[in-house]
Image (spheres, rainbow, N blue to C red):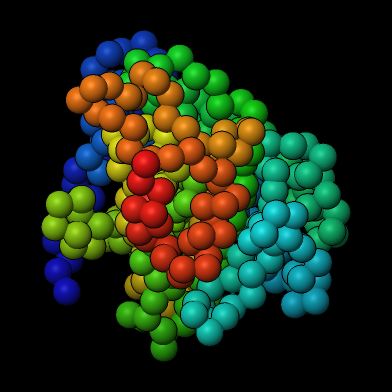
Amino acid sequence: MSHCPAVQSEIPVIDLRLAGVAPEEAARMRDAARRLGCFRVSGHGVASALQADMRAAVRALFDLPDDAKRRNADVIHGSGYMAPSATNPLYEAFGLYDAASPADVDAFCSCLDAPPHAREAIRRYAEKTHEMIVDIAAKLASSLGLDCSFQDWPCQFRINRYNYTPDTVGKTGVQIHTDSGFLTVLQEDDCVGGLDVADPVTGEFSPVEPLYGTFLVNLGDVATAWSNGTLHNVRHRVRCVAGMPRISIAIFLLAPSDDMVRAPEAFVSAELPRRFRDFSYEDYRRLRQSTSEHAGEGLARLVA
Ligand code: MG
């Protein structure tokens, strides 16, 4: 397998403070979203101390006994605790839905009996990262000429631990997939890499190393449909590259608040006719589940 860092070297770091005011920064963001389906952000307003507090809170939650972890139940399908499984034996995750709702964040902490310090970190982190993801989405839309608010789009957290040991190096952490929603913002582990993203042309995977102080943004299937095929849903996977547990914290902006995904007219023209029929995120999620097509193949079934 090639480890050529082709994609890694191309992933730009977008300064969010500039992206709203400097056309060239907005253009870099747009070009990366269209071509690669991913970019990094700096200038995001989430303090590194808060990121560290959140990682500490998360590590404490994963150290809870199994029966306690299982109290994090589904709110929507797939939103609760996922124990290691036959498909992904090294992977476990907590889920929080809706991360934009202070009451839901509170309920998540209460069901796990999170201690006060962890609870405060999770509450503040959810608030700040929700602000960030809404800001990224609005600036991305603006770079495409659209004035949109993403404030009320539902938002999900998935808090991941990969239980790596020296014996699992080289094994799969999570299989090849695209994210199903609109966009994902990832806080990577501060020590352990392992994320690979696919080159949009060759399909070849190359590793993406964590970059201190930045978040990684990935576009998912809803972004491709919502933009009438303009934005690229990036394929990615996770492999074990070190014999120690890896933590990552993903926040997903899923789909419009009325659940219907439909490209705004601005993305549709005589040269670029409407590519996808309207669909609900929930139906699409079920389609991915029932067909076991997790890498964006399902979009072909939605062609108008
Ligand atoms: Mg993913």
Looking at this view, is 116 or 100 the one in front?
100
In screen coordinates, is 2 left or right of 232? left
Q: Residue at x 43, y 24 (%)?
A: 264
- The quarter of the displayed image where residue 209 is located: bottom left
Residue furthest to the bottom: 167
State the image coordinates of residue 29 (x, y, percent, origin top left): 30, 29
In screen coordinates, is 292 left or right of 4? right
Q: Is residue 149 above or below residue 274?
A: above
Q: Residue at x 52, y 33 (%)?
A: 133
- The quarter of the displayed image where residue 272 is located: top left
Residue furthest to the front: 304
Quadrant observed for ligand 1 in the rendered image? bottom left
Q: Residue at x 78, y 48 (%)?
A: 119
The quadrant in which the C terminus is found is top left
Observer able to see residue 266: yes
- The quarter of the displayed image where residue 174 is located: bottom left
Q: Residue at x 36, y 19 (%)?
A: 266
State the image coordinates of residue 72 (x, y, percent, origin top left): 76, 62
